Amino acid sequence: MKTNHLISAMALATVFACSSFAADVTRDDRQFFEKAAKSGMKEVDVSGAVLPNLTAPAVREYAQMMVAHHTQANEELKALAAKKGVMLPAADTDLMRKWSKNNKDVEDEYLDEMVDDHQEAVKLFEKASRSSDPDIAAFAQKTLPKLRNHLELAQRHKKAN
């Protein structure tokens, strides 16, 4: 019986330690983690889903780059969230169904989506780059140049398309 109480007390202490650790993360930083995770997963999922339907070589190359870059950033975000004791949201599986359908305007729609998404991501990461948490600020500052480049490329491909 004493062993069960000891195990329960240890489990409770672990939960408390993790929750107090995560409590050190500000509300703004928590929102950053949630929005950045959703955005990053969306970029990978949407780009992967449209890839088979893209015909323009430059847009296909862009989508492949989105998958590679955002997969890497997502892994870094996951590691940072784990370090901070923050749980990230799950991927939105409905996105895959929406974007995997082939239609004649898939490239235009995809590029429109990438421009909109990256405009939002740049704003999100610019704000996070000023976080009082040096780890979060450093991650955002490191990621911002790629996001700005992704936005610029999406805008350029959109004009060319």
Image (cartoon, grey):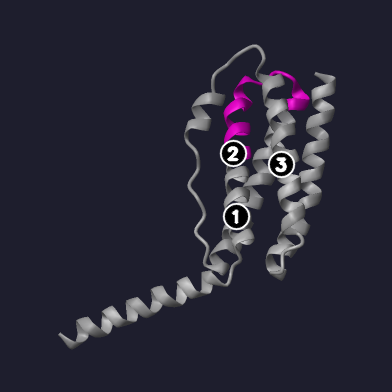
Q: Position of residue 64 (x, y in %)?
A: 68, 35
Q: Is residue 119 left or right of residue 100?
A: right
Amino acid type at image mark 1: Gln
Which one is closest to the eye, mark 2 or mark 3? 3
Q: Which mark is residue 42?
A: 2
Q: Secondary structure at mark 3?
A: helix
- Extreme residue in the top direction: 104
> Mark 3 to mark 1: distance in Å?
14 Å
Task: From the image, tell me which residue sits under label 1.
Answer: 31
Residue flagged by tag 2: what amino acid is it? Lys
Mark sitting earlier along the chain (2/1): 1
Q: Residue at x 48, y 31 (%)?
A: 94
What separation in Å lies between label 2 and label 1 (alpha carbons)? 16 Å
Of 80 and 17, the residue lying toward us? 17
| Magenta residue span | 42-59
Relative side of 136 to 9, left or right = right
Tell me which numbered mark, 2 or 3, is placed earlier along the sequence: 2
The disc placed on residue 6 is none
Q: Amino acid at mark 3?
A: Glu
What SS does tag 2 mark? helix
Which numbered disc, 2 or 1, marks the residue closer to the eye? 1
Query: Could you say where residue 51 lies in the image, as x and y percent from the top left?
Result: 63, 27
What separation in Å lies between label 2 and label 3 (alpha carbons)?
A: 13 Å
CB contact under 8 Å: marks 2 and 1: no
Judging by the rendered image, the residue that carries numbered circle 3 is 120
Q: Position of residue 123 (x, y in %)?
A: 75, 47
Q: Residues within 10 Å of mark 1 (few under 14, many from 20)?
A: some
Residue projecting furthest to the front:
27
Nearest the eye: 33 or 46? 33
Compare marks 3 and 1 and give the one earlier in the sequence: 1
* Residue 148 sits inside the magenta stretch: no
The crowd level at tag 3 (other Cα within 10 Å; few <14, some 14-19, many 20+) is some
